Image: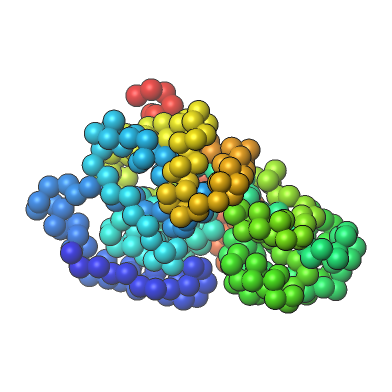
Amino acid sequence: PMRFIVSTDYLGVGWLHAGLLFTVMLSIAPSASHAQATTRGARPLRVAYLSTSATMAPVWMAKDSGGFAREALDTEVLSMSSSSAIPALIANEIDVVEVSAAPVLTASLRGIDVVFVAGLLNTMIWDFYARPEIKNVEQLKGKIIGTDRPATPVAYGTLVALKKMGLTPKDVQLRPLGSSPQIVAAFYAGQIAGGVGSPPASFKLERDGFHSLVSLLDVPYQNVGLVVRRGRMDELGSRLVPLLRAVRAGVERYYADKAFAMKVIGKYTKETDHDVLDRSYEFYKKAGFRRELVTSEPGLQGILDFLSESIPEAKTAKPAQFFDDRFVRQVNSGK
């Protein structure tokens, strides 16, 4: 099949230009893969996950615990870079993507028809870490804090952490470095005094003497959920209900079978350190994958408030614009 996959920024101008390009492509001709599916019969449901972080565990658990097979659902579970996922979804190259809200809301606010059909993790997973010699929040003032580009999840988490500690961006020096790997590297290079981190990198930071000044685990946030194109919901509907049942079963297996869940996490993350796997499992058990698959309206509102500084349309948008829970309601009612 013809593939319209472009390497672009996770968010920002480059991504938005890519989204507009895909919109133009799709207005000219239908997706070649969609045409093939029509002539040859329905292809497998393509579900993409975007990182080797254990945030993606619900889809992994659904696959490896046999949930998709029990639902007789022909499924391909694919690993994809975060920069390619939304464009691939727009081009119908994938059908469902497990992704957090910032890129979804950014795309939707720019007119792309992407929508959450389920929420899987509805809290932030960051702690704000500081160098060993920084003992309290007051000592952060005037220091360099690592962050990411405007409108990215890490930038949002950093601002939330500062507010929770009673600081404003003017109290520190925010330095955009990139996402979590770049921030961790900057810690070890001695370039920054503080920044947000999440598992498993946060476990290494703690072992090496960096310490958390504040946890964001109690902050509502639409972390990963399942996203589709709104225009394909009727087409995909008969397969979305069994998909959601399988994912819910995977979440239930996560809580019921720690040994198996750790094995699955290790398989997809390539992590072999038993302590890291154990801590990863316990962290996400505490964070709470959602059995009921609900999308967090307060979490979406918080991101809209954040995005409103760079995207004017976010100021008047409402959380209900970005999710459709019709299939979750069917699953939760036993239909």
**Residue 170 shown left or right of residue 45 in the figure:** right
Quadrant in which the C terminus is drawn: top left
All told, the count of numbered labels is 0
Q: How is the image coloured?
A: rainbow
Of residues 61 and 279, the one nearer the viewer is 279
Q: What x and y, as percent, mark residue 38?
A: 13, 52
Residue 160 seen in render: no
Q: What x and y, as percent, mark residue 76?
A: 28, 49
Q: What x and y, as percent, mark residue 89?
A: 34, 58
**Residue 52 shown left or right of residue 70 in the figure:** right
Q: Is residue 151 above or below residue 114?
A: below
* Residue under the point 77% across and 60% down: 209
Quadrant in which the N terminus is drawn: bottom left
Q: What x and y, as percent, mark residue 132?
A: 82, 63
Q: Is residue 335 above or below residue 20?
A: above
* Residue under the point 82% across and 73% down: 143
Which residue appears farthest toward the left when viewing the image? Answer: 39
Q: Quadrant of residue 313?
A: bottom right
**Residue 252 shown left or right of residue 20 in the figure:** right
Of residues 324 and 122, the one nearer the viewer is 122
Q: Is residue 237 above or below residue 90?
A: above
Q: Is residue 50 above or below residue 252?
A: below
